[in-house]
Amino acid sequence: MIGKTRRVPPISRRLFLAGSAAVVVTACSGDDEASPPSTTEPVPAPPTSAAPATTAGEATTTTDAPTTTTTTTPPGPALERDPFTLGVASGDPAPGTVVLWTRLAPEPLTGGRMPADDVEVRWEVAASETFDDVEASGTAVATAAHAHSVHAVAMVGPGERWYRFHAGGWTSPVGRTSAAPGPGVPVERVRVASASCQHYEDGWYVAHRDLAAQRPDLVVFLGDYIYEGGAGEVGVDGNVRTHGTPEVRTLEEYRDRYARYKSDPDLQAAHAACPWFVTWDDHEVENNYAGTVPQDPADAPGFADRRAAAYHAWWEHQPVALPPPDGSGTYRIHRAGTWGDLLTLAMLDGRQYRSDQTCGDVGLDLDPACPETFDPARTMLGDEQEAWLLDLLSTGTATWHAIGQQTVFGDTTLGPAVLNHDQWDGYPVQRGRIVERIAAAQAAGHALDLVVLTGDIHFAGAGMLRHGPRGTGTPIGVELVATSISSGGRIDPAVQEVVKAIPDILDVELEHRGYILHTVTPERWSAEYRMAETVKEPDGAMYVHATYEIDAGTRTVRFAGT
Ligand code: FE
Ligand code: CA
């Protein structure tokens, strides 16, 4: 993000870091070849999920034979205290399946305080909130090794569903979810919220409360789910509450930080409202890390282990249809989802494989970009992810193709200056390749309506993406930048007008926090920018800042009122 303070290493140190990053990225790309390769195959189910053939003694995951009793009798030993303090979540909806998540943690802020044993958890899915008609059920094992988290893959029929868990004599809150319509299934409408950056100390989750009330079909979360920094003081620097603990570095500390965030009732309500597609950004590990290069060179010793711990805790706390990290230190999370014939969504990882930021990554930078910015070896996504993305975009058949990713993709350079080396402006060669390929596919007749969903920067924006000169090149798509849920804007308001004056940028709004509620139909993509008047009060009101619309086939965005 813009405006961070970064210790700028001496020139010799910077060159060393750049060289190290290149080596690391090559190694990561090689490792990736063993990762799940396909854009269309379902991701493998995590081992803790219930599966019909492997869960002894349970009528699991059936979609055609409702159980005759509501299965409220919990398996396993009784627990003295309610373990469902972190709520429930669902995610990665696929045709016929969705992942159901919870974590057992009677004392969430201090390690969970579960017994050391693994615990069986029963889950249920029903077509109504009363669970009179349980459609699918099963058991999953919440293992101590994974902080007693549960990732159960439920097979469910089309449409709205309700789910809950039972463990140790307790029953969880109820969540609302659904599987995705299958490939090619006609879909008249999908409502998708895109959001990012929910710094716990910076604000109350007013936007999450509104999001839950809006009941979208999906949430696309673009990263900075947690912030890793040490506790601030309430009332200082705008803090409305405190993390309570120092900067997190170990697996146990990352777990407790996730638990701090997930204890918030508004965040729990947003998760319970609908399934989420989640990716990460930098703060899930450390601000502006790149590959295995930490922001602060002093953090380099042990950083690979820290990153691995952070990735592990991320998996434990997110409703993703991914296997747990395998201990190698790298972890593939980029993946695609589909929603019938209407929408394909590519969720990107712009942190794990990237080259280190150039020019010292000094924050807002008005100097001409240093030459290394244009080194063709530099990468944001890594080779494998780039190839995967381009394959997805050039072969997909859905009406709309969305990319859920972290940093601003559009060109916001000012003459020779790269304002923010952490964004795609700092990775111009790879961006150029991606734009070329998209434009070539479109020129060849591929009906690719591209919408890039962006987070990270803590301001709202809308802009055109073009092949060729800004303002006059051929439109290839649209970028919609969600502001933060709560994280403070840290950019000088004077920058707002400067950036707004850049061709192709329709809007920049720095002052307010919120998210975007997208209504997508075969004819139109409509993006409603919903914002909180303030997040410094728990009951801040919401308003609509603006609505932007894209007509299918135009690759052009227009202001459509408030
Ligand atoms: Fe952020
Ligand atoms: Ca970020």
Image: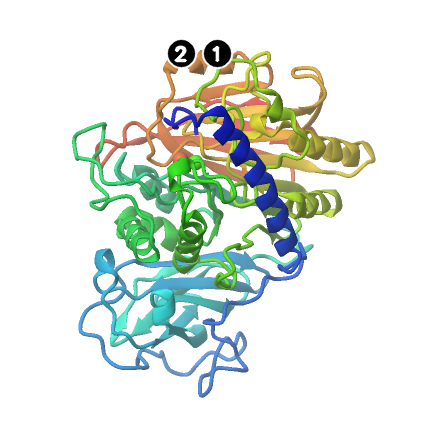
Image coordinates of residue 35 in percent, x first then y, are 62, 59
- Coloring applied to the structure: rainbow
The residue lying toward the viewer, choosing from 319 and 127, is 319
Asked whether mark 2 and ligand 1 are closer than 8 Å, the reply comes as no
| Amino acid type shown at disc 1 | Val
The secondary structure type at the circle numbered 2 is helix
What amino acid is at disc 2?
A: Ala
- Residue at 39 percent of width and 72 percent of height: 123
Answer with the quarter of the image where residue 43 lies. bottom right
Give residue 435's position: percent from left, percent from top. Answer: 70, 31
In the foreground, 411 or 290: 290
Give how far across and how far down residue 177 sits, in percent: 45, 58
Between residues 260 and 129, which one lies in front from this camera angle? 260
Which residue was labeled with disc 2? 494
Label 1 SS: helix
Q: In the picture provided, is 271 more to the left or to the right than 96?
A: left
Q: Is residue 442 above or below residue 168?
A: above
Pointer 2: residues within 10 angstroms few (<14), some, or many (20+)?
A: few
User: At x 39% / y 24%, what residue is drawn?
Assistant: 3
Quadrant for the C terminus in the image = top left
Q: Is residue 486 visible?
A: yes
Residue occupied by mark 1? 498
Q: Is residue 246 above or below residue 114?
A: above
**Residue 344 percent location from the top left of the image:** 63, 47
Q: Is residue 553 above or below residue 264?
A: above
Quarter of image, ligand 2:
top left
Callouts 1 and 2 close, C-beta under 8 Å: yes
Residue 110: name its quadrant: bottom left
Q: Residue furthest front?
A: 12
Residue 484 against residue 131 in the figure, above or below: above
Q: CA distance from mark 1 to mark 2?
A: 7 Å
